[in-house]
Image: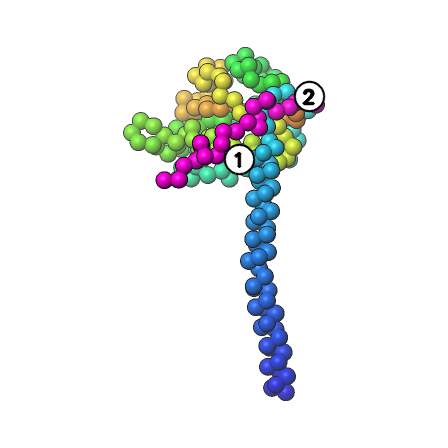
Amino acid sequence: MKKVLFFVAGIALMGLFSACNQQPKEQEETTEAMNTDFLTLAAERFSVRHFSDKPVEQEKLDKILEAGKLAPTAVNSQPQKIYVIQSPEVLEKVNKLSPCIYGAPQVFLFCYDDNNVCPRGENDNYGDIDVTIVLTHMMLEAWNLGIGTCPVGYFDQKELAKSLELPSNIHPVLLMPFGYAADDAAPSEKHSTFRPMEEMVEYI
């Protein structure tokens, strides 16, 4: 009887060891697939400069905003303040202040809040950097959901803050029109042109 029990226990342990040995390989394959998918997403995404008038569903908008919430910021200060511009009145104001809205039915305005931002030395802070990271997370999640975007820095930040009557502690950084791409939307001619990796990267 004891021999039978030892034999069964031995088989069970061999199965356990076999499963443990296979696990890293499975994880490695999953990680490789995730890496490939992300690079494909990053390569296929382009700045949309012609939008349809179809609004983005709230469910998708919530996921895009969640991606911004999860973005890393300096010491996790989370200084971002994001406005979802969609009313005709505010869209009209934004279109007057920037020629780069491209007919989008909705626009993100990315700002940082002085009350939450992490200082960077005596006279600077990480607000611009943090907000840009947040925008990038949202931009990629939007594309993942079939929503086009176009990051825009071409506007007068002070004029925008004044026009929208933003509180003095809120600082505009970037705009990002978003929505479904029009049928004729296409990447710019320079979209797939890259400097050689050896020019961009140096090991020291």
- Relative height, residue 200 to residue 89 (above, below): below
Residue 57 as seen in the image, left or right of residue 85: right
For the residue labelled by badge 2, is the local secondary structure a helix, a strand or a loop? loop
Camera-near label (2 vs 1) is 2
Q: Amino acid at mark 2?
A: Asp
The amino acid type found where label 1 is placed reads His
Q: Position of residue 154 (x, y in %)?
A: 49, 18
Image mark for residue 34: none
Furthest-bottom residue in this view: 1
Residue that carries the numbered disc 2 in the rendered image: 184
Q: Position of residue 26 (x, y in %)?
A: 59, 56
Please identify the quadrant where the N terminus is shown: bottom right
Q: In the figure, 147 relative to 102: above or below?
A: below
**Would you name the residue on which mark 1 appears?**
137
- Residue 41 placed where, x, y %? 60, 36
Residue that sits furthest to the right in the current view: 183
Does the magenta portion include 36? no
Direction from residue 188 to residue 118 in the image, left or right? left
The residue at the point 61 percent across, 85 percent down is 3
Q: Nearer the viewer, residue 137 or 35?
A: 35
Can you see residue 32?
Answer: yes
Asked if residue 178 can be seen in this view, the reply is no
The magenta segment: 183-204
Q: SS at mark 1?
A: helix
Expressed as whole percent of the image width and height from the top left, the position of residue 4 reads 64, 84
In this rendered view, identify the residue nearer to me: 184 or 92.
184
> Who is closer to the viewer here, 94 or 13?
13
